[in-house]
Amino acid sequence: MNDFDGMRALVTGGASGIGRATAELLAGRGARVAVLDLDPSTVDKPLLAYAADVTDDASVREAIAAAVTDLGGQGVLDVLVNNAGIGAQGTVEDNDDAEWHRVLDVNVVGMVRCTRAALPHLRASSRAAIVNTCSIAATAGLPQRALYSASKGAVQSLTLAMAADHVREGIRVNCVNPGTVDTPWIARLLDAADDPAAERAALRARQPTGRLVTPAEVAGAIAHLASPLSGATTGTVLAVDGGMHGLRLRPAARP
């Protein structure tokens, strides 16, 4: 597919995991793509790479301005993928105020900063789309994820509000809600578990497909929402979770 031919896209948190898979997929489908990340040193051509901290407004504005210039198109940006985010574990008792502020600053306000800086360039596009990376944690009560779930619940609500605010400007806004994705963050959680193999098996079993979601599968959903072929789709929450949000399977029969 070349549905992104001639388009310019920017992916935050694009140096690894879901962000990297998304950036490479968009480039493979014809877009010129810029990646923003705290450490973009591993990003290779044809992707353009910029260092940025989404908790620093000046850093975000500087990086996005440079990216839009280098992408060409006289200040036009067609796609923004707000993917930068961090995880958190624990109940409401387990994280202090500083950690709550830190996670919300990255996962929610960081998304606001990136969108705010990109909006003037998106308004100049006739095919503008924003896709936010949310999570199954926004809609399902998961143990030991109070802070993370609160941040992703905010992202889902923010997505719908943004869609309403900007639909008449021709900017579509949607989000993807991945289940448990086989990313470096999940790998670190598994490594820290008392029994990594048992923990991985439990995460697989939690999803009806019986396996973890791949970054490429989430990237495919993001590309679907960002594509001009989805021009009538806005204010949509797309689950990419192996059926976790909607399926209630009976226990498998024992052999």
Image (spheres, rainbow, N blue to C red):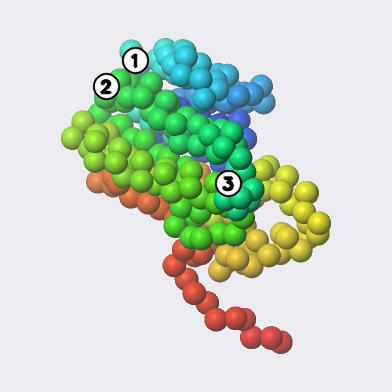
Q: Is residue 176 visible?
A: no
Q: Amino acid at mark 2?
A: Ala
For the image shown, how many numbered marks are present on the structure?
A: 3
Task: Give the number of the disc on residue 124.
Answer: 2
Q: Is residue 234 left or right of residue 215?
A: left
- Mark 1, secondary structure of its residue: loop
Mark closest to the chain's N terminus, 2 or 1 = 1
Q: Image check: 73 left or right of 191? A: left
At 24% across and 34% down in the image, what residue appears? 166
In the displayed structure, would residue 217 be above or below residue 130? below
- Determine if residue 133 is in view: yes
Q: Position of residue 199 (x, y in %)?
A: 73, 60
Front-most of 62 and 100? 100
Helix, strand or loop for disc 2: loop
- Residue type, numbered disc 3: Pro
Mark 3 lies on residue: 215
Which labelled disc corresponds to residue 199?
Answer: none
On the rendered structure, is 201 left or right of 20?
right
Q: Mark 2 packing: few (<14 Cα in 10 Å), some, or many (20+)?
A: some
Element type at mark 3: helix
Give above or below for 38 relative to 144.
above
Q: Are marks 2 and 1 in contact (CB under 8 Å)?
A: yes
Residue toward you, 224 or 46: 224
Q: Which residue is mark 1?
A: 75
